[in-house]
Amino acid sequence: MTEIAVVYDGSALLAYAHGQIGAAELISEINAEGRHVGVPSTCLAAALAALTDDWDIIQLMRLAHTKTMVILPLGGDDGQDPAETLRQVSEFARLAHGDLTVGHAVAAALTYQAYYVTANPKRATDALPPSWPVLDLSPVALMRDRLGLTVASTAPALPARLDDGDEDQDHAPTTEMPTQVKPMLATVGSLPVAGEWGYEFFWDGMRAIAYVTGDKVRLLNRSNVDVTQTYPELAALSSALAGRRAVLDGEIVVLGRNGLPSQTALQQRMRARAPSASLVGGSPVRFYLFDLLHLDGTDLMPLPYVERRDALQRLDLTGDTVDTPPYWTGDAGPALITAAQELGLEGVIAKQLAATYQPGRRSPAWIKVPFTSTVEVIVAGYKPGAGHRSGTIGSLLLGMYDADDQLTYVGQVSTGLTEAAQRDLQQRLEPLRQPSSPFAQPVPRQHARHAEWVRPVLVSEVTFRSWTPERRLRQPSWKGLRDDRDPADIRLST
């Protein structure tokens, strides 16, 4: 039997293709030892199907052509009855919540007595025997294993006002639970070098605040639009809180096959106001919590961030649907930046440990350190495609409101528009067409030629390199629509 030291599942292959150092270093070590990396054929196919960047695809295909990688067929090639192998794979897939690729990888790890390598360990650990060796490439594991940093610990005791054992608890003043809180927002800047800060990964999702009373859960997005029906699986918050009343702040995400938030997958869920059972099952959301604003009659917003975070962690809200990612303190900031870049995350957020929660304010007490500049813009028109994009949308004309509430042209974007995005935009923009430009000032002639104008009601998100002197976006790239944003809030900063 071929000596296979480790088995890479689909999420680990994606981590390798995206350039994660941990995933690549392990393969180099295995190669130096003269051993092999087992890759189930289903995992390789799924990873290639999930990749959209040509360079990432090339990286994975180069690995597939080396002697280090051994592709493992679904039917098995070790002399075992193929029918029996398929039965075992099916059983492991059932234990892995119906994921065939994970079932195949688990079966391979057991057959070859190999370590299981993954960036999304939950389903694998459910299917593997207890204590089976798993090499975890997920963000928290990377911080712990490769960079030697442990998460911030929970304080030894709760603040007195939250301690259930406080003899004066029954006489403590209570406040009515708020029904609407504007989220506190971060400023964009560099990693702070002075003061006491906590550090979190920046998750690429949709901001939401959850209001939980008894068995009722209500979700409002950043614009205070009710999105409860869009994410029915988050009703699990009520049972997780076991009857406690709470207001929680966090990010709704959909994980891709690499175990990291996928904006493309999230867009599919955001568009479905009443999602079908198949959509919920195929693209389940997770609610990543990072703040606790109210608990059982106590307003926590005046408390320091570190105390609110401590109270949140004591609720132990972890699982498939609701999770509380950790945070780090001390001098962990630079290491967190390194880890986030390796993982392909959007960036890092630093939060002052002593900061109160400031509803609706973009506060310097929270600093977002992005790796690329991201901005929200309004779609105000489009130009028909040509060549291979003939019959679809070629580019979008973008705008933002200035200080005088006039819609100002900021550029056009075509990079990043996938075929699926073009089809969706075509359907959405067709009924919004209007005969004249919605911009207050004329758009440059070369950009306005052949343009179709639309009512400026759709908000999108783009990444870009920098602003030109004319306040135009340089090298913008499409990320997706943001149905949770109000066009009136999209402002051109001075």
Image (cartoon, rainbow, N blue to C red):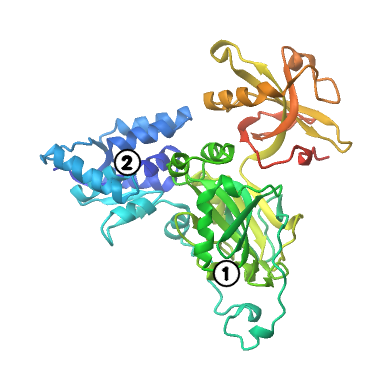
Residue 366: x %, y % from top left:
69, 57
Quadrant of the image for the C terminus?
Answer: top right
Outermost residue on the bottom side: it is: 167
Q: Which of marks 1 and 2 is nearer the N terminus?
A: 2
Q: Between marks 1 and 2, how big is the CA–CA gap?
A: 38 Å
Query: Which mark lies nearer to you, 1 or 2?
Result: 1
Which residue matches tag 1? 244
Image quadrant in which you'd find residue 60? top left
Residue at x 61%, y 46% (from the top left corner): 206
- Under circle 2, the secondary element is helix
Residue at x 56%, y 75% (from the top left corner): 155
Residue nearer the viewer, 473 or 30 = 473
Compared to residue 49, the image places residue 340 above or below, namely below
Residue nearer the viewer, 41 or 275 = 275
Compared to residue 424, the image places residue 109 above or below, namely below
Compared to residue 131, the image places residue 368 above or below, namely above
Which label sits on residue 101? 2
Q: Can residue 325 be seen in this view?
A: no
Q: What residue type is labelled 2?
A: Thr
**Going by the image, does 135 lie left or right of 424?**
left
Q: What residue type is labelled 1?
A: Arg
- Under circle 1, the secondary element is loop
Residue nearer the viewer, 108 or 284 = 284
Q: Can residue 179 be seen in this view?
A: yes
Compared to residue 168, the image places residue 219 above or below, namely above
